[in-house]
Amino acid sequence: MLETNAKVICIELDKRMINILQDRFSLYENFEVINDDVLKVDLKKLIQKNKKENITNVKIVANLPYYITTPIIMKLLEDRLEIESITVMIQKEVAERLTTVPGEKLTGSITYSINYYADPEMIFDVPNTSFIPEPEITSTVIKLNILKNPRIKVKNEKVLFRIIKAAFMQKRKTLLNALVNNNIFNTKEDAEICFENLGLDLKVRGEKLSLEDFARISDYIS
């Protein structure tokens, strides 16, 4: 990345790595390192500061700590940063869930969140033999191409994501029962009326719905 002459701002939490990074890349004028936790860095402010220096086409590239992959990705998306894409290496199992099409077998609540904000794509796998010591898992590089505007319009985003989260908290139950059990609807009768008005099967499960279907439920409630 440095050799493309792009400005590279590295955020690294491990203090032991800071000296190594600075020594290795000290000859590059386009390199800057910040010793901090990415979840605590004001990325919006950092991007704005650099845009004043005529830097455009901001992209995020990272090898994420696998145990906090989802919180980091969701923070990057929910903060509505002025970025073009997010390219990250993550656990293959998680990558498949993030890049699948909503409504398919591997769909989870995170699938809908990703599709709301971006067009995801799988780039390539990284075998465990690429690491020392070798982990038990395979890694995958994915790219999230950020949409200029969310894929769909809803009256209330918080309601939308609350419904999606509730739908997957009890995956084995029907969507109707999951939403009633998680207090999205006051009564089962209220839920049945909503489903009938929207033309939804009363026995459908959450993973079978499209993002647009969840939006219709959200707008109905809103």
Image (cartoon, rainbow, N blue to C red):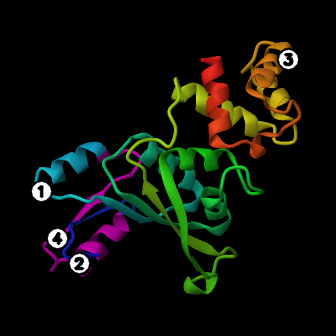
Query: In the rendering, at what x and y percent does residue 135 appear?
Result: 64, 76
Q: Do the residues labelled 3 and 2 touch (CB within 8 Å)?
A: no
Give the mark, 3 or 2, whose residue is nearer the N terminus: 2
Of the numbered discs 4 and 1, the one sitting upstream in the chain is 4
Query: Tag 4, which secondary structure?
Result: loop
Q: Using the numbered discs, state the Cα–Cα distance from disc 4 to disc 1 in whole angstroms.
A: 14 Å
Q: Residue 162 placed where, x, y %?
A: 63, 29
Q: Name the residue under label 3.
A: 188
Lower position in the chain sequence, tag 1 or tag 3: 1
Which numbered disc covers residue 207?
A: none
Judging by the rendered image, the residue that carries numbered circle 1 is 54
Residue at image location 79% in from the left, 25% down from the top: 195
Q: Which of 149 and 159 is in front in this view?
A: 149
Residue extent of the magenta highlight: 15-43
Q: Which of 37 and 200 is in front in this view?
A: 200
Q: Would residue 12 be counted in the magenta stretch? A: no
Q: In this view, does 78 lie above or below 131?
A: above
Q: Does the magenta stretch include residue 34?
A: yes
* Residue of label 2: 4
How far across and down, in percent of the image, does residue 14 sit? 39, 63
- Viewer-nearest residue: 159 or 195: 195
Q: How crowded is mark 1: few (under 14 residues within 10 Å), some or many (20 or more)?
A: few
Looking at the image, tell me whether mark 2 or mark 4 is earlier in sequence order: 2
Q: What residue type is labelled 4?
A: Asn
User: Image check: 60 left or right of 34?
Assistant: right
How far is mark 3 from mark 2, CA to CA?
58 Å
